[in-house]
Image: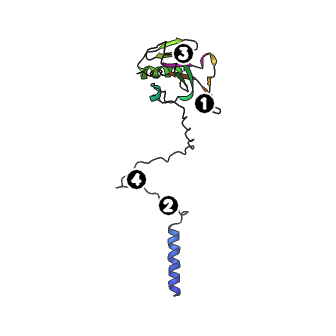
Amino acid sequence: MRGWVVGVLASAVVATSAFDPAAPQTPQPFPRPGTVQAPAVPAPAPTAPTPPAAAADPAAPTEATLGFPIYPTAQFLASYDAGRGQRYYIFGVTAPYADLVLYYRSQLRERGNEVFREPPTYMFEVGRFRSETMAFPPGVTIKDWTWGGSQGYPNPKLGGEPARFPSIIMIVPPPPPAPTSR
């Protein structure tokens, strides 16, 4: 029995020494002849945790309700009664004024007009203005709030990001159709 125990212990010592991580390893050719190597894939870089998406503002209008495109990164800021059954909707945008002009030219397929050079203000009137039923012509107005060294339009949302918007978009949809009398 004693020989059996010694044999088991000896084989355990041999097996342990064969897998000793401190023992020098024989370099292996890379790639080994006759093997196909898969391309090396770098380990993904650690990423910062993504902040949770801001809750959508339930009062924010949609493109469908406005009848106009909304710039993709625009943040809805407020809506005001324009009178005569119209509202206008204000959006803050971090994109430069010139980018917004190009975007709306493309989306609305309208050239639009620069209505003020100082501060730069561009207007796209879409639809016919009827003074008897409208307070504003339907369309999109873009204003550069960084003109003259301004830091931008202050974000009215307490603690909102960004603190200031370089550009503002005002969208005025046409008023709802007047009810017909029968």
Q: Quick one: label 1 or label 2, which is nearer the N terminus?
A: 2
Query: Residue farthest to the left?
Result: 34
Q: Which residue is mark 3?
A: 121
Q: Quick one: label 4 or label 3, which is nearer the N terminus?
A: 4
Mark carried by residue 178: none
Q: Which residue is mark 1?
A: 162
Residue 131 screen position, x and y as percent: 49, 12
Q: Quadrant of residue 160?
A: top right
Magenta-drawn segment:
132-147
Q: Quick one: label 3 or label 2, which is nearer the N terminus?
A: 2
Q: Nearer the viewer, mark 4 or mark 1?
A: 1
For mark 4, give the secondary structure. Answer: loop
Q: Residue at x 52, y 61 (%)?
A: 24
Q: Residue at x 40, y 53 (%)?
A: 31
- Label 3 crowd (10 A; few <14 / some 14-19 / many >=20): many
Q: Residue at x 44, y 19 (%)?
A: 105
Q: Amino acid at mark 3?
A: Thr
Mark carried by residue 25: 2
For mark 3, give the secondary structure. Answer: strand
